[in-house]
Image (spheres, helix red, strand yellow):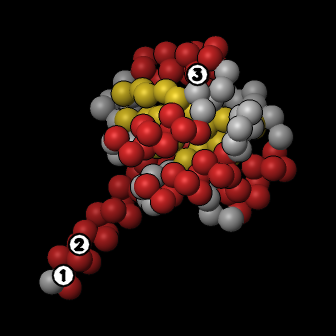
Amino acid sequence: MTGYGKRVLIVAHDEGERNVLGLMLENEGYNVHMASEEGLALEELKRRRFDVVVSAHHMPHINGFRLALLGRLVWPDTPMILLSGNETSMSETVEQGAAYCSLRKPYVFSELLELMETAIQLTRRHRSQISRSTLLSS
């Protein structure tokens, strides 16, 4: 189990997609929270810190870029992985630094797990470096 105790927020308008991905991640040990749209996702982000956010890029009222930007206001260092069938629109979001990376649908679940783990490890290293430098400068 790669995700033991780690929190992930899944944001997708499609209920089936949310539920299937949620079950698969729970089987890997992740503590899964889900949201069907931007407002609910932002409420979840305000309630707790997540290790990673996995979001559909295209949703009825928002796209992944806007959600990534708004999410950065709440938790600037929480990595977001975008899922979409359209590679070109996602690459802009990643290039501008709003999202950690993107994965094109249909994706291989093991690839998503690997991206999530890498994002979580990099973020934890970054946080610990910031904590150490803060302690040293005090």
- Horizontal and vertical percent for residue 5? 30, 32
Between 13 and 138, the residue placed more toward the observer is 13
Residue 112 marker: none
User: Which residue in the protein does label 2 denote?
Assistant: 132
Label pair 3/2, CB-CB below 8 angstroms? no
Residue 82 appearing in the image = yes
Residue 43: image quadrant is top left
Residue 116 appearing in the image = no
- Horizontal and vertical percent for residue 8? 44, 35
Q: Amino acid at mark 3?
A: Arg
Q: Is residue 93 above or below residue 108?
A: below
What's the residue at 65%, 52% (across, down)? 66
User: Which residue in the protein does label 3 denote?
Assistant: 18
Instruction: Please rate how many residues cluster around mark 2, counting C-alpha atoms within 10 Å: few if below 14, some from 14 to 19, many from 20.
Output: few
What's the residue at 62%, 29% (across, down)? 12
Mark 1 or 3, closer to the camera? 3
- Element under label 2? helix
What's the residue at 55%, 47% (across, down)? 80
Cα separation, mark 3 vs mark 2, equals 37 Å
What's the residue at 58%, 21% (across, down)? 18
Relative side of 10 to 93, left or right? left
Q: Is residue 63 above or below residue 30?
A: below
Image quarter in which the N terminus is found: top left
Residue 136 marker: 1
Dot 1 or dot 3: first in sequence order is 3
Q: Amino acid at mark 2?
A: Arg
- Horizontal and vertical percent for residue 101? 63, 50
Between 67 and 122, the residue placed more toward the observer is 67
Label pair 2/1, CB-CB below 8 angstroms? yes
